Protein backbone atom coordinates (compact mmCIF):
# COMPACT_ATOMS: atom_id res chain seq x y z
CA UNK A 1 0.00 0.00 0.00
CA UNK A 2 1.22 3.48 -0.91
CA UNK A 3 -0.02 6.58 0.89
CA UNK A 4 0.80 10.19 0.07
CA UNK A 5 0.90 12.47 3.12
CA UNK A 6 0.54 16.15 2.33
CA UNK A 7 1.20 18.84 4.90
CA UNK A 8 0.30 22.32 3.79
CA UNK A 9 0.89 25.90 4.69
CA UNK A 10 2.83 26.60 7.91
CA UNK A 11 3.02 22.94 8.94
CA UNK A 12 6.79 23.22 8.52
CA UNK A 13 6.66 25.57 11.53
CA UNK A 14 5.27 22.94 13.93
CA UNK A 15 7.14 23.17 17.22
CA UNK A 16 7.82 26.87 16.64
CA UNK A 17 4.39 28.25 15.82
CA UNK A 18 1.96 28.36 18.75
CA UNK A 19 3.44 25.42 20.71
CA UNK A 20 0.48 25.63 23.12
CA UNK A 21 -1.76 24.67 20.17
CA UNK A 22 0.46 22.44 18.03
CA UNK A 23 2.91 21.07 20.59
CA UNK A 24 6.66 21.46 20.99
CA UNK A 25 7.85 18.65 18.72
CA UNK A 26 9.29 20.01 15.48
CA UNK A 27 8.37 19.29 11.88
CA UNK A 28 11.26 16.88 11.39
CA UNK A 29 9.86 14.85 14.30
CA UNK A 30 6.43 14.84 12.67
CA UNK A 31 7.76 13.49 9.38
CA UNK A 32 9.83 10.83 11.17
CA UNK A 33 6.75 9.83 13.21
CA UNK A 34 4.58 9.48 10.10
CA UNK A 35 7.16 7.36 8.25
CA UNK A 36 7.68 5.07 11.28
CA UNK A 37 3.93 4.66 11.74
CA UNK A 38 3.68 3.68 8.09
CA UNK A 39 6.46 1.10 8.44
CA UNK A 40 4.68 -0.45 11.45
CA UNK A 41 1.71 -1.07 9.16
CA UNK A 42 3.72 -2.10 6.10
CA UNK A 43 2.60 1.07 4.30
CA UNK A 44 4.98 2.97 2.03
CA UNK A 45 4.59 6.63 2.92
CA UNK A 46 5.64 9.51 0.70
CA UNK A 47 5.67 12.86 2.46
CA UNK A 48 5.23 16.27 0.86
CA UNK A 49 5.02 19.73 2.42
CA UNK A 50 4.42 23.04 0.71
CA UNK A 51 3.29 26.52 1.64
CA UNK A 52 2.00 26.99 -1.91
CA UNK A 53 -1.58 26.11 -2.82
CA UNK A 54 -0.61 25.51 -6.46
CA UNK A 55 2.20 23.13 -5.52
CA UNK A 56 -0.20 21.15 -3.34
CA UNK A 57 -2.69 20.90 -6.22
CA UNK A 58 0.08 19.79 -8.59
CA UNK A 59 1.25 17.11 -6.13
CA UNK A 60 -2.33 15.82 -5.81
CA UNK A 61 -2.69 15.71 -9.60
CA UNK A 62 0.60 13.83 -9.98
CA UNK A 63 -0.64 11.29 -7.40
CA UNK A 64 -3.30 10.11 -9.83
CA UNK A 65 -3.07 6.36 -10.37
CA UNK A 66 0.04 6.13 -8.16
CA UNK A 67 -1.28 6.08 -4.56
CA UNK A 68 -3.88 4.10 -2.66
CA UNK A 69 -4.73 7.01 -0.41
CA UNK A 70 -3.96 10.59 0.58
CA UNK A 71 -3.66 11.96 4.09
CA UNK A 72 -3.83 15.73 4.00
CA UNK A 73 -3.41 18.48 6.55
CA UNK A 74 -3.68 21.54 4.35
CA UNK A 75 -3.28 23.96 7.26
CA UNK A 76 -5.16 27.21 6.69
CA UNK A 77 -5.92 26.17 3.09
CA UNK A 78 -8.40 23.73 4.63
CA UNK A 79 -10.72 26.66 5.22
CA UNK A 80 -10.14 28.56 1.98
CA UNK A 81 -9.06 26.34 -0.90
CA UNK A 82 -11.66 25.20 -3.35
CA UNK A 83 -8.70 24.47 -5.67
CA UNK A 84 -7.36 21.75 -3.33
CA UNK A 85 -10.86 20.31 -2.97
CA UNK A 86 -11.24 20.21 -6.75
CA UNK A 87 -7.82 18.55 -7.19
CA UNK A 88 -8.78 15.83 -4.70
CA UNK A 89 -12.10 15.28 -6.44
CA UNK A 90 -10.40 15.17 -9.84
CA UNK A 91 -7.99 12.36 -8.95
CA UNK A 92 -10.56 10.32 -7.02
CA UNK A 93 -8.06 8.97 -4.50
CA UNK A 94 -9.51 8.05 -1.08
CA UNK A 95 -8.57 10.85 1.33
CA UNK A 96 -8.38 11.39 5.08
CA UNK A 97 -8.17 14.94 6.40
CA UNK A 98 -6.01 15.40 9.51
CA UNK A 99 -5.52 18.35 11.86
CA UNK A 100 -3.09 18.41 14.77
CA UNK A 101 -5.33 20.80 16.72
CA UNK A 102 -9.07 20.51 17.21
CA UNK A 103 -10.25 22.97 14.59
CA UNK A 104 -13.80 22.74 15.98
CA UNK A 105 -12.66 24.14 19.35
CA UNK A 106 -10.81 27.08 17.81
CA UNK A 107 -11.87 30.26 16.02
CA UNK A 108 -15.17 30.09 14.15
CA UNK A 109 -13.53 30.52 10.73
CA UNK A 110 -11.61 27.27 11.27
CA UNK A 111 -14.81 25.23 11.65
CA UNK A 112 -15.45 25.24 7.87
CA UNK A 113 -13.43 22.76 5.84
CA UNK A 114 -13.66 22.52 2.08
CA UNK A 115 -11.55 19.34 2.13
CA UNK A 116 -14.08 17.57 4.34
CA UNK A 117 -16.57 17.84 1.49
CA UNK A 118 -14.48 15.12 -0.20
CA UNK A 119 -12.57 13.35 2.57
CA UNK A 120 -13.85 9.98 3.77
CA UNK A 121 -12.79 10.77 7.32
CA UNK A 122 -11.72 13.83 9.34
CA UNK A 123 -9.40 13.46 12.33
CA UNK A 124 -8.85 16.56 14.44
CA UNK A 125 -7.26 17.36 17.78
CA UNK A 126 -5.18 14.22 18.25
CA UNK A 127 -1.76 15.76 17.67
CA UNK A 128 0.71 13.66 15.71
CA UNK A 129 -1.44 10.64 16.60
CA UNK A 130 -4.03 11.78 14.06
CA UNK A 131 -1.68 10.74 11.27
CA UNK A 132 -1.27 7.31 12.87
CA UNK A 133 -5.05 6.95 13.07
CA UNK A 134 -5.35 7.92 9.40
CA UNK A 135 -2.78 5.31 8.38
CA UNK A 136 -4.64 2.70 10.41
CA UNK A 137 -7.88 3.71 8.72
CA UNK A 138 -6.38 2.92 5.32
CA UNK A 139 -4.86 -0.35 6.62
CA UNK A 140 -8.23 -1.46 8.03
CA UNK A 141 -10.05 -0.40 4.87
CA UNK A 142 -7.91 -2.65 2.68
CA UNK A 143 -8.35 -5.57 5.10
CA UNK A 144 -12.10 -5.59 4.39
Image (cartoon, rainbow, N blue to C red):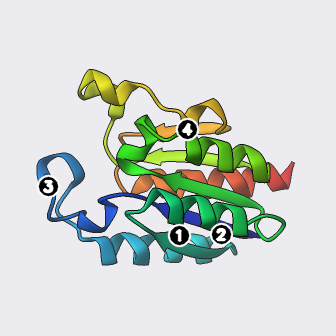
Residue indicated by mark 4: 82
Q: Label 1 to label 2, Cα distance in Å?
A: 7 Å
Q: Label 3 to label 4, Cα distance in Å?
A: 28 Å
Residue indicated by mark 3: 19
Residue 117, image x and y in percent?
Answer: 62, 30
Q: Quadrant of residue 110 in the image?
A: top left
Pointers 1 and 3 in contact (C-beta within 8 Å) = no
Q: Secondary structure at mark 3?
A: helix
User: Would residue 69 be found to the left or right of residue 55 on screen?
Assistant: right
- Label 4: how many residues lie within 10 Å, few (<14), some (14-19) or many (20+)? some
User: Would residue 75 be found to the left or right of residue 72 on screen?
Assistant: left
- The relative height of residue 52 versus residue 74 in the rendered view (above or below) is below
First of labels 3, 4 by sequence position: 3
Q: Quadrant of residue 51 in the image?
A: bottom left
Q: Secondary structure at mark 4?
A: helix
Rendered residue at 41%/78% (across/down):
32
* Residue depth check, mark 1 versus mark 3: number of the one nearer the observer: 3
Residue 39, image x and y in percent?
Answer: 60, 78
First of labels 4, 2 by sequence position: 2
First of labels 1, 3 by sequence position: 3
Q: Label 3 to label 2, Cα distance in Å?
A: 29 Å
Residue indicated by mark 2: 41
- Label 1: how many residues lie within 10 Å, few (<14), some (14-19) or many (20+)? many
Rendered residue at 73%/43% (across/down):
89
Pointers 1 and 2 in contact (C-beta within 8 Å) = yes
* Residue depth check, mark 4 versus mark 2: number of the one nearer the observer: 4
Residue indicated by mark 1: 37
Amino acid sequence: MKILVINGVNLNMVGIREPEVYGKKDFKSLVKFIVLEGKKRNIKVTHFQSNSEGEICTKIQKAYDKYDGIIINAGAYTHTSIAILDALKAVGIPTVEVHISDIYQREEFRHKSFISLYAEKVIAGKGFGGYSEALQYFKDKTAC
